Amino acid sequence: MADIKALKTAGMLPMRLKNHFSVRLRVLGGDLSPDQLRTAADAADRFGRGKVHVTSRQGMEIPFVKFEDLEAMREFLAEGGLSLGIGGPTVRAVTACQGNKVCPWGCVDSQGFAREVSKKYQTKKLKCKFKIGVTGCANNCLKAEQNDIGVKGGLFSELDFSKCVGCGLCVGTCRAGALTLVKGERLDRDASGCVGCGKCVRVCPSGAWKGVEGYRVYFGGSFGNRIAVAREAFPMLRDKKDALGAMGAALDYFAENGLPGERFCNLLDRLGWDDFKNNLRETLGPGFFPESPEKSPGERAAKSRAQNGRKGRGKSSDKTGAKSRPASRVKKA
Ligand code: SF4
Ligand code: SF4
Ligand code: SF4
């Protein structure tokens, strides 16, 4: 008799129709090559009923495959460069938007980051499924906060006010309302309101803004039976390795403390957000956390800005203006 649990874990999901399965393909970051797509189409014709379903998490499933055809289909897919999607208690296929290799708004390479995450953590043994998604900027097309761990690309924006021609475009484009031209003498930023979208960098016609890649990491989201919005434990990270390390630390915490079948958000409720955060602080070091005497990665970026005459991330405004440019050249936004 078929081991249905093992089949499900291997990506072959029983259908309502007796003896039939919907076969899930492994799709990383929503990307497939033309050859892989052709293989999927051929497999659907040959083993299914000519139907391929695109799932809500960027995956693909081929339904109406008979039990006796499963092994032959798996071999056929493997020859065409496709493997079956992983199910069960582990990290599921990492989803990602197109990121900065394609999308004009992208702050980071979401696809490349998703591949790194997958390589590092895809086979990790857990007690419940775990979803990771990577979105390239604050537009959040991939909905970072809906994942057990979501990563959102951002930019640390830095201003060289001596290059500013006072056009006001950055002020107008900042949907967070974080920028203000003050009497044409300086450009203030409400650092607590800045979401790191990097739009100021892109619209500036004079190259006064410079953007440095950043990674915001969110923990504990779920949009299934339970709705939970993932949240940040520390400010935006400058170093990709820090983001990957933080994800690893959270996965270890989940593996060590989770109960069988318990989703990450429920574990965080059971043990408390502070317990998780303290564990991250111990594992990653206090440098990640702004209240710490040591500098967090976000603060390191702020320090770098401060070295150029500006204040960093915090509740107070960045006074980004400089006396190096005559006020008469500044137009009001
Ligand atoms: S999240 Fe940003 S980078 Fe990703 S597709 Fe949307 S707009 Fe582009
Ligand atoms: S990066 Fe910050 S200051 Fe610049 S447009 Fe986005 S929210 Fe505004
Ligand atoms: S020139 Fe000055 S006001 Fe215009 S977008 Fe650049 S920084 Fe903003």
Image (cartoon, rainbow, N blue to C red):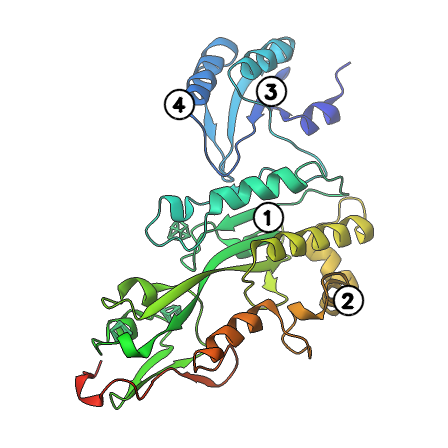
Residue 275: assigned label = 2
Task: Give how far across and how far down residue 272 sits, in percent.
Answer: 75, 66
Q: Earlier in the sequence, mark 1 or mark 4?
A: 4
Q: Which of marks 2 and 1 is nearer the N terminus?
A: 1
Q: How far apart are marks 3 and 1 (CA)?
A: 22 Å
Q: Distance between the residues labelled 3 and 4?
A: 25 Å
Q: Earlier in the sequence, mark 2 or mark 4?
A: 4
Residue at image mark 4:
34
Query: Picture quarter containing residue 268?
Result: bottom right
**Extreme residue in the bottom direction:** 183
Indicate the quadrant containing the C terminus: top left, top right, bottom left or bottom right.
bottom left
Q: Is residue 315 left or right of residue 168?
A: right
Q: Please tell me whether mark 3 sits on a helix, a strand or a loop.
A: strand
State which image quarter holds ligand 2: bottom left
Q: How far apart are marks 2 and 4 (CA)?
A: 46 Å
Asked if the residue at tag 4 contacts the one at tag 2, i.e. Cβ–Cβ closer than 8 Å, the answer is no
In the rendered image of this protein, does residue 276 appear above or below residue 52? below
Q: Distance between the residues labelled 2 and 3?
A: 42 Å
Amino acid residing under circle 4: Pro
* The residue at label 2 has a CB less than 8 Å from ligand 1: no
Q: Distance between the residues labelled 1 and 4?
A: 32 Å
Q: Can residue 205 be seen in this view?
A: yes
Amino acid residing under circle 2: Asp
Amino acid residing under circle 1: Gly
> Which one is in front in this view, the residue at disc 1 or the one at disc 4?
4
Residue at image mark 3:
21
Indicate the quadrant containing the N terminus: top left, top right, bottom left or bottom right.
top right
> Which one is in front in this view, the residue at disc 3 or the one at disc 4?
4
Say which residue appears at 48% left-offset and 78% top-offset.
Answer: 307
Asked if the residue at tag 4 contacts the one at tag 1, i.e. Cβ–Cβ closer than 8 Å, the answer is no
Say which residue appears at 43% left-offset and 73% top-offset.
Answer: 194
